[in-house]
Amino acid sequence: MEYREPVVQEGPSTPLHELWIGAAKTHLNVDWTYEDLLIEEKLRAAISTVEAVTNRVLLQTTFRLYLDCFPRRDFITIPKGQLSSVNYLRYYPATSSVVTWDSSNYEVDSVREPGRLVLAYGKCWPTDVLRSVNGVEIEYIAGWPTADQIPYALKAAVLLTLGDLYMHRESVVVTDSGNAVSVTPTVQNLLSPWILWHD
């Protein structure tokens, strides 16, 4: 089954760039305020870059994953890492209304990275003919619960990327081309152990 990017439904109550702005200014050796907006924008870009490279979300976020059909195997891979919980699995039969599948039919594997929704013993996926697109909907929560729980290697990668963006405002461009995001070798070394690969 092809990889599908989930859709953000609800972000953290306080965005990560607001929680890390103090650390960002300390990292940049900035003690003035007139560049706060610029630093905040570049910090947000740095966080987005680290998340794109690792295929993760750093701070706890609610997502919806849409699939066209149920898989042939007995599990569904849940993207973005640090799976906390699955709120529900719904499916949309072609000729009837939406069905919320009882959670007793599946188990949530939050130990494996990325997490999985796995069929319970003796269960099988519904056999209804689904609508032609987005017939399966899974809402879940992923990411670390608090900023303090985010591994320091990821925070360091964010701050180093921020430093590049702040110091080289024109000559260094962080771009996303397909799935490849350009980062420095040091940042790549920090992020390599944290990259999630999807089958």
Image (spheres, rainbow, N blue to C red):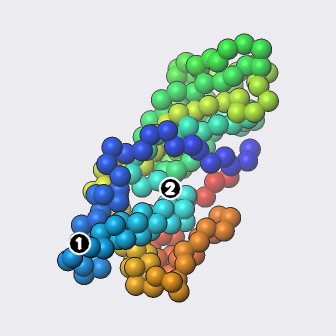
Which residue is farthest front?
34
- Image quadrant assignment for residue 89: top right
Kindly state the secondary structure of the residue where label 1 is placed.
loop
Q: Position of residue 39 (x, y in %)?
A: 35, 71
Residue 126 in the image, given as x and y percentages of width and height: 70, 21
Tell whether 150 sits left or right of 1: left
Q: Quadrant of residue 68?
A: top right
Q: Is residue 111 left or right of residue 198?
A: left
Q: Residues within 10 Å of mark 2 (few under 14, many from 20)?
A: many
Left of 74 or right of it: where is 45?
A: left
Residue to which mark 2 is pinned? 56
Is 87 above or below relative to 149? above
Of the pair 11 and 116, the residue shown nearer to us? 11
Which of discs 1 and 2 lies nearer the camera? The answer is 1
Residue 110 seen in the current view: no
Identify the residue at image location x=44%, y=78%: 165
Q: Tell me if residue 55 comes above or below residue 124 in the rendering.
A: below
Q: Is residue 137 above or below residue 196?
A: above
The number of discs equals: 2
Q: Residue at x 37, y 45 (%)?
A: 12
Q: Secondary structure at mark 2?
A: loop
Q: Amino acid at mark 1?
A: Thr
Which residue is drawn at the image coordinates 35% and 56% (left, top)? 16
Give the camera-side residue of 137 and 164.
164
Q: Earlier in the sequence, mark 1 or mark 2?
A: 1
Q: Which mark is residue 52?
A: none
Q: Which residue is mark 1?
A: 33
For image coordinates 74% across by 44% down, the residue present is: 1
Q: Which three-letter amino acid code belongs to the residue tagged 2? A: Arg
Residue 110 in percent (x, y) is at: 47, 42
